[in-house]
Each structure stands twice: as C-alpha cells, then as structure tokens.
Image (cartoon, grey):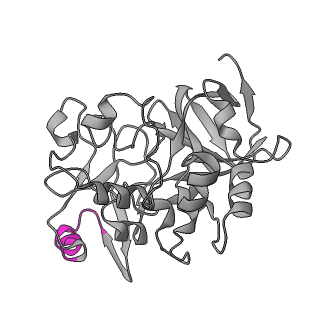
Amino acid sequence: MKIKSIWRYPIKSMGGESLTQSLLSEQGVVGDRLYALHDGQSICSAKKYAQLMRYSARYDTEPDGINIPPVTLEIGNTAVNSEDTNLEELLTRELGTNVTLDKLKPDDNLEYYRRSTAQQPIEEIRNVLGLEDGEPFPDFSEFPDSSFEFSTPPGSFFDAYPILVLTTNSLNRLQQVTQGAVIDERRFRPNLVIEAEELEAGFIEEQWRDRFLEIGDTIIKLTLPCPRCVMTTIAFQDLEKAPQIMRALVQENHHKLGIYGQVVKSGKIQVGDQAHLTEVA
C-alpha cells in the first residue's frame, strides 16, 4: 500500500489544499482545520451551509504547528485574505446570516464549541444526513458522548477525530454501485487516500478498525468507520449534485466510507510513501 494523496482544509467545510508532503502531529495534518465560521449559535459546516464547499482556502505561508498563518479565500471569482476587514461582511452577505471567521479556540472554551440547543425537526435532520424517507439513521452509538454535546471536540474543528483515511478500493467499489455520478475523492474530504489495490476489493476500512497504519516513522491508530452525510452529494467545483451517492452508501455500506484515526506517533509523510497495517503500534 502507498499514499496516493494528502489533503488539508484550512477552513472547516471549505475546499482545501492537495499536498505532496506534510507533517502529522497529534492534531492531524499540520494546518488542518485551524479556522471555522461561527453563526452565533454554533460552528458552521456545509451540512447546514452547502455553499461553503464551493469556496476554498489556502495558507499564505506554511503552518508550523504553533502559529496560525493567514489564509486566502476564493469566494466565487473573489480572492480575499482572512485579515481583510471586509471579509466577514462578504461572508455574511454570501451566507445570508451573520458569521465570524475564527481561529481555533482553547479547549476550555466549551460554550463556543457547544451545539445549538435549538430543536431540529426530524425532516431537517434527515436532510442534513442526506437520507430519504424510510432510510435508517446511521449508528452513532460508538461515538463519544461529547460528539452529541459539541459541534466539534473542544479545542479542534474536526467532526470527531483528527485524521480521515480513505482507500482507492472503497472509491472504486462506490463507483461500481453508484449510477450516474462521478466518484471523486474531493467529495469525501479525506486527509489521506491510500492505494491498497493488492488487498481485496470493496469497502475495506471496516476491517481496519482498532489497527495501526504505519507510514515511515509515523503511526496512526484507526478508530471508527466514518458515517456519511449530505456533504458527499453537494455540487462544487466541477462536480455535479449527486444524491445517488448516499443511496449507494446506505444500501451497500451502512452509510460509511473511510475510517477515522488518531496520530499516536508524529512524523513526516509524503505522497508515494509505503503504508503498512499492523495489529500493535
């Protein structure tokens, strides 16, 4: 197996950067999701504000894991810097609600990370998850209780865990069972895409849970398969809207695609590096 691609996303839910190499730390790919929008009630994501995936962001200078450098956003045909005093006014106008662009807050600022207490109608929850009437909800029973109290784990802008690993095997299988949609890794916002063609075909990440992925000196503990939502179906860049992706994932793999991970040994990785699965770190 080897690394096919590495991704980081400077701003939560916006398009990110394809990297040839990166440092991995306990916080994941260095520089990943160090910014997010906040609408005064909770941290914003494309689950609610789909247009965020049509925007993208890149760092002005390479992040070092300590300081958070400015980013340049591409919003339609407009490029605007995170330090521009007009940025939040532009984003507010684009999204139709008041938002701020925030750097990562300390993990003891619990109120900032807390989910909105507004009750969501069941139809709205189904829309967020990309489900049709009659389709079952994903199984979130193995996720930490804090996942239901906070939009993201306090001290981070990740949905659950700092690394998302996806294999070409799963992407190829999803393409086989999805009618009329282009299966492109950008839809699924991985951090690492692994070519594992020598292994069996299909959605293989489920078998990787509780194992370790070694890449050079770096070690990632693989945790839980990732349940998917409406974000996989949104149109952005050159990709059309594709609700059939969720139909296929619900029917073929219990909503899941890819697997979350935690970095247990930091180090440098690059595209083309060999990756190995082990039972112990």
How far across and how far down the image is residue 187, in percent?
Answer: 54, 62
| Res 23 → quadrant | top right
| Res 45 → quadrant | bottom left
**Magenta highlight on residue 90:** yes
Q: Residue furthest top?
A: 280
In the displayed structure, 183 sits above or below 281; it is below
Q: Residue furthest right?
A: 198
Q: Nearer the viewer, residue 3 or 149?
A: 149
Q: Is residue 18 left or right of residue 49?
A: right
Residue at 42% across, 31% down: 143
Q: In this orientation, does residue 272 appear? A: yes
**Magenta highlight on residue 91:** yes
Residue at 22% across, 68% down: 84
In the displayed structure, 151 sits above or below 212; it is below
How far across and how far down the image is residue 142, in percent?
Answer: 45, 28
Q: Is residue 72 left or right of residue 165?
A: left
Region rendered in magenta: 81-93
Q: Is residue 194 left or right of residue 11?
A: right
Residue at 23% across, 34% down: 106
How far across and how far down the image is residue 76, in percent?
Answer: 38, 80
In the displayed structure, 218 sits above or below 67; it is above
Q: In this orientation, does residue 46 appear? A: no
| Res 147 → quadrant | top left
Q: Residue furthest front?
A: 134
Residue at 23% across, 52% down: 102
- Tally the numbered discs: 0
- Tell me the quadrant of the picture where the N terminus can be found: top right
How far across and how far down the image is residue 276, in percent?
Answer: 75, 31
Q: Nearer the viewer, residue 207 or 37?
A: 207
